[in-house]
Amino acid sequence: MLTQLITATGVLALLTLVPGPDMAIVTKRAVSRGRADGLRTVGGIALGLLLWGTLTVAGLAALLAASAGVYLAVKLAGAAYLAWLGLQSLRHAGRERPLPSGQGTGSAWRTGLLANALNPKIAVFYTGLLPTLAPSGLRPAAGMALLVLVHVLLSVLWLGSYVYVLSRARHFFARPRVRATLDRLTGVVLIAFGIRVATAAS
């Protein structure tokens, strides 16, 4: 069982390292609002993964993945949300300033949570991949729950470390020209991910 768990962890780690919407969102929040805001965004992302993980273990995510109408609705909502974040980044390119301490904390959590809660691809990923990776020595539900926790932990460690690296170089990103360029780039990337989500096959 230990060998299977190590193998599954390796697969999940590789998938976690692949850049996606989460990294783009974390980049935007960490650079524009600071380390604490970036970490809160990571926390929201983790909650989104836990939500889909819970639905997967309960068997509800498989029903969503199998329902074309519901899947399409969630997919389009997620795509629209990513596109909206991208447009906001383009609109405020170079103009946003860090919020005073203690303000806007809910927004960071909500941004991370919604980005994953409105991404049905996670449901497909969990229901399609986790059963094949779950250790055979555990009950299927327990094995999948364990792998969900492993994936959440890997995501938090990776994105949290990424936030730390960004914060160390924040003086560079604070330069107006660099800031504006990064805002525009992040905006384009988020819109591109939104289009990709909207047009991807189920």
Image (cartoon, rainbow, N blue to C red):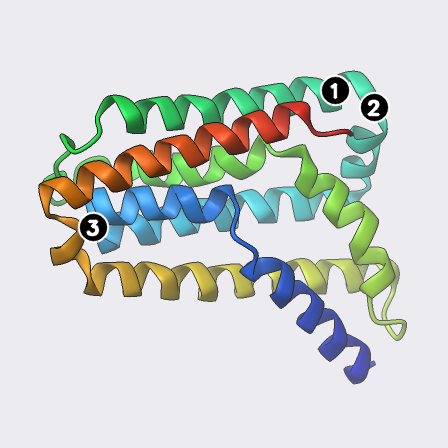
Distance between the alpha carbons at the discs numbered 3 and 2: 40 Å
Q: Which sits in the foreground, 141 or 152?
A: 152
Query: Could you say which disc has been placed on residue 70 in the image?
Result: 1
Under mark 3, the amino acid is: Gly
Image location (x, y in percent) of residue 179: 18, 42
Image side of residue 94 versus residue 38, left or right = left
Residue sitting at x 83%, y 23%:
67
Can you tell which quarter of the image residue 199 is in? top right
- Marker disc for residue 14: none
Provide the secondary structure element on which disc 1 rests. Answer: helix
Reading the chain from its start, which is encountered first: label 3 or label 2? Answer: 3
Above/below status of 61 relative to 71: below
Name the residue: 26% across, 21% down: 91
Whether residue 6 sits left or right of residue 46 in the image: it is right
Give the Cα distance between marks 2 and 1: 6 Å
Residue 44 lies in quadrant: top left
Mark 3, Cα crowd under 10 Å, few <14 / some 14-19 / many 20+, is: many
SS at mark 3 in the image: loop
Disc 2 is placed on an element classified as: loop
Of the image marks 3 and 1, the number of the one nearer the N terminus: 3
CA neighbours of label 2 inside 10 A, class few (<14), some (14 to 19), many (20+): few
Count neighbours of disc 1 (C-alpha within 10 A) and say few if under 14, some if 14 to 19, many if 20 or more.
few
Q: Which residue is mark 3?
A: 34
- The residue wearing badge 2 is 67
